[in-house]
Amino acid sequence: MRPPRRWPLHPPPGPLESLSSWARRLARLYGMQVPELLGHNLGLIDLTIPANLDRDPPLAMLAALAERTGVDLAQVRATTLAGWVPWLVDSLTVEPHQAQDVFDSYVHANPVLLEPGATSRHLVHRWKTWRSPWLSKSGLDRVCPLCVHDPDRGRALMWQLPLMLSCIEHGYQLENRTDLEVALALGRPPPMQRVEEPVATMDRYTYEALTTGEVVLPGRTVHAGAWFRLLRSLLDELSLATTTLNFHGRTTLEFVWRTTGGEQRAGLAIWQPFEQLEWPAQETMLRAAAIALALVADGRISARGVFGPALHQAAHQPVYDGDRPPPDINAMMDEVIAEARRDRATARQLLTVLTFGCRSLLRFEDERAYLLRLGVPAEFIPGARELGRLDLLS
């Protein structure tokens, strides 16, 4: 028997929810497991359900889900990482021989704090497991400690990446899902930690990029793709050894790390791509990036890179007000207008001066109306024929 084209129960995915999370919520409505729901109810023959639903599942499966739920296919695809190409990453599949070019283009070509060319080229291809910007060596599985209590709430796709530190809706720091669920099962839930500025601001920028497609930074509004590359480049700069930098770069990074109160480079002894770091080091790097953004916005450090001007308000540029007419000219005009209100000849002469450059009857009439508004009697203001402007009547 052919499955119905539209499932009777089909709540849409939540904002930025991952496909795996949405599929679990749908399956729970029918008392099923996800493989059972997707394996027998999409009308697809020989469908192989991928182990990782959130990366790049078959387009046919996404199209069938869109049909069964009434959700637009583009929205369904946005529940997967593939749906965020090329905004978040240029490609999910980076071959080993492409890794260096991808890294150089995405990260190294977009300095933030440092001048272009101020750093040496890092050889990312030495790390064989480096797959792409933002895709960690070991995936993350984080949840909001408040959202997790609501079975109808999903988990955001981007919580699997080292991209954000908090749940924007509630302002709490994201926690490892397994650790949190074990603690709750034992009746010992950990205290929920609110994130403070400037981390909250940085996460709001990222959330804005994900939900609106652009980010309003202090200096200008940038496309979401530019924001992701800006943030990733900033994280790379914070991982650099200061001994390799010039005076500006060295003092800038040292000041950022002193402001964090933590160990410089998050304790990194030998440079590694951000994606290769363990989560505690990634978290420290993200906090340092948030502090760096705040320091630039406050003018406490300078950002000399390609993206630097976007991070602070432009200096005030005075605008010339123009030459003011001498006070006696204003007084003279007041006298002429006052005389035109009393004297027909003066009014006629004033109209002649005002309409000298008029090339259309409409413009001529505008000047006549102007004199009327100034209180000059209508009988003192001749028309175009009376004034001899026959050129306007042809």
Image (cartoon, rainbow, N blue to C red):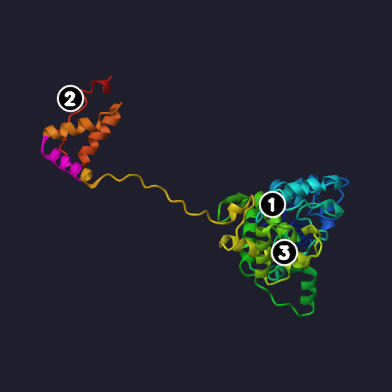
Task: Name the quadrant containing residue 19.
Answer: bottom right
Q: Report if residue 242 lies within the magenta region.
A: no
Mark 3 or 2: the one toward you: 3
Tell me where residue 255 appears, x and y as whole percent.
65, 66
Residue at 64% across / 54% down in the picture? Answer: 209
Q: Which quadrant holds the C terminus?
A: top left
Amino acid carrying label 3: it is Met
Is residue 40 in sight in this rendering? Answer: no
Give the camera-side residue of 118 and 330. Answer: 118
**Residue 97 on image: x %, y %:** 85, 45
Residue sitting at x 83%, y 46%: 44
Pointer 1 residue = 229
The local crowd at label 2, few if under 14, some if 14 to 19, many if 20 or more residues have their Cα within 10 Å, is: few
Q: Secondary structure at mark 2?
A: loop
Of marks 3 and 1, which one's residue comes earlier in the chain?
1
- What is the quadrant of residue 326 in the picture? top left
Name which residue type carries label 1: Arg
Residue beneath the point at 25% across and 34% down:
367
Q: What is the number of the mark on residue 386?
A: 2
User: Is residue 59 in view from this perspective?
Assistant: yes
Span shown in magenta: 331-343
- Could you tell me which secondary element the residue under label 1 belongs to? helix
Most common secondary structure along the magenta stretch: helix
Q: Is residue 36 left or right of residue 333?
A: right
Taking 156 as reference, is 306 above or below it? above
Q: Nearer the viewer, residue 222 or 24?
A: 222
Q: What type is the residue that disc 2 sits on? A: Glu
Q: Which residue is mark 3?
A: 285
